[in-house]
Image (cartoon, helix red, strand yellow):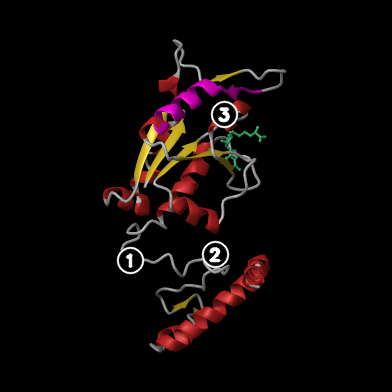
């Protein structure tokens, strides 16, 4: 998968993409990230990407020109690319959306800044996408969350060390509790079944614990799962 990130801060992405699973996926050529500096698509001496809002008000608005010219350049090379504008206006990212995005060959992530982007940019993207009901100071952390979640679903990205199949949200459940050494930590013991070596008993305990955690902390997920299977 190729991800094209349109941003005025390409340097924002350097260290997060150089560690862990995103790094491994890039090394394995499962993921390619192209950082597109919006300032490359300006035509004035100051390389201006923002301007004051029409109608007045505080803050600055990102100009449509550099964003749409950068989109044109990406689309010329990848005409089927799926274009996402990170914005509080979109539906919030969830597991289903991550799975949908993981099937795309070329994904474009447009990062806003300041008070947001000129409304006319929306005519040149496929959808808005939010990462939750709060306001970030830029689309970059949201784009990183999208990249990180999507890369985990790409075939070959996790390798043999892990599987995305049993993780939280896959079946509208949260994952079961995990433990590692020591066996007793500050008086708290690991559930004995996990030390039993009985794989069937362990699987049963984990299934039950997953249901219990979900019922306690996210009953909305269970309700959603039940509605879906009706
Ligand atoms: N004035 C806008 C917020 C702009 S925040 C408003 O009130 O809606 C600046 C940029 O950060 C946005 O253009 C968007 O790209 C990004 N951003 C902020 N919050 C976000 C969220 N919850 N999800 C995705 N992107 C977000």
In terms of image quarters, where does ligand 1 lie? top right
Q: Earlier in the sequence, mark 3 or mark 2?
A: 3
Residue placed most toward the observer, 81 or 14:
81
Q: Which mark is residue 121?
A: 3
Question: Mark 2 sits on what residue?
Answer: 169
Residue placed most toward the observer, 93 or 75:
75
Q: Nearer the viewer, mark 3 or mark 2?
A: 3
In the rendered image, residue 210, in percent from the top left (x then y), is placed at 55, 75
Q: Quadrant of residue 221?
A: bottom right
Determine the residue positioned at 45% across, 39% down. Answer: 108
Instruction: Read off the magenta span.
Output: 59-75
Determine the residue positioned at 46% across, 44% down. Answer: 144
Q: Quadrant of the C terminus?
A: bottom right
Q: Nearer the viewer, mark 2 or mark 1?
A: 2
Q: Earlier in the sequence, mark 3 or mark 1?
A: 3
Question: Mark 1 sits on what residue?
Answer: 161
């Amino acid at each position: 998968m190729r991800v094209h990130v349109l941003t005025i801060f390409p340097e924002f992405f350097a260290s997060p993409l150089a560690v862990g699973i995103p790094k491994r996926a890039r090394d394995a050529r499962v993921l390619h990230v192209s950082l597109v500096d919006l300032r490359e698509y300006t035509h004035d001496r100051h390389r201006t990407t923002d301007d004051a809002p029409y109608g007045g008000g505080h803050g600055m608005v990102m100009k449509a020109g550099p964003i749409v010219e950068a989109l044109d350049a990406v689309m010329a090379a990848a005409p089927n690319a799926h274009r996402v504008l990170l914005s509080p206006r979109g539906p919030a990212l969830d597991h289903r959306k991550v799975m949908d995005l993981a099937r795309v060959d070329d994904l474009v992530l447009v990062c806003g800044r300041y008070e947001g982007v000129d409304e006319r940019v929306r005519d040149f993207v496929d959808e808005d996408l939010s990462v939750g009901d709060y306001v970030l100071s830029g689309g970059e952390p949201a784009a990183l969350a999208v990249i990180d979640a999507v890369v985990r679903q790409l075939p070959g990205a996790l390798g043999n060390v892990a599987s995305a199949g049993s993780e939280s949200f896959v079946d509208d459940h949260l994952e079961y509790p995990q433990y590692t050494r020591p066996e007793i930590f500050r008086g708290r013991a690991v559930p004995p079944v996990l030390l039993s070596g009985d794989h069937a008993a362990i699987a049963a305990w984990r299934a039950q614990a997953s249901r219990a955690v979900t019922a306690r902390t996210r009953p909305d997920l269970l309700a959603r799962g039940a509605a879906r299977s009706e």
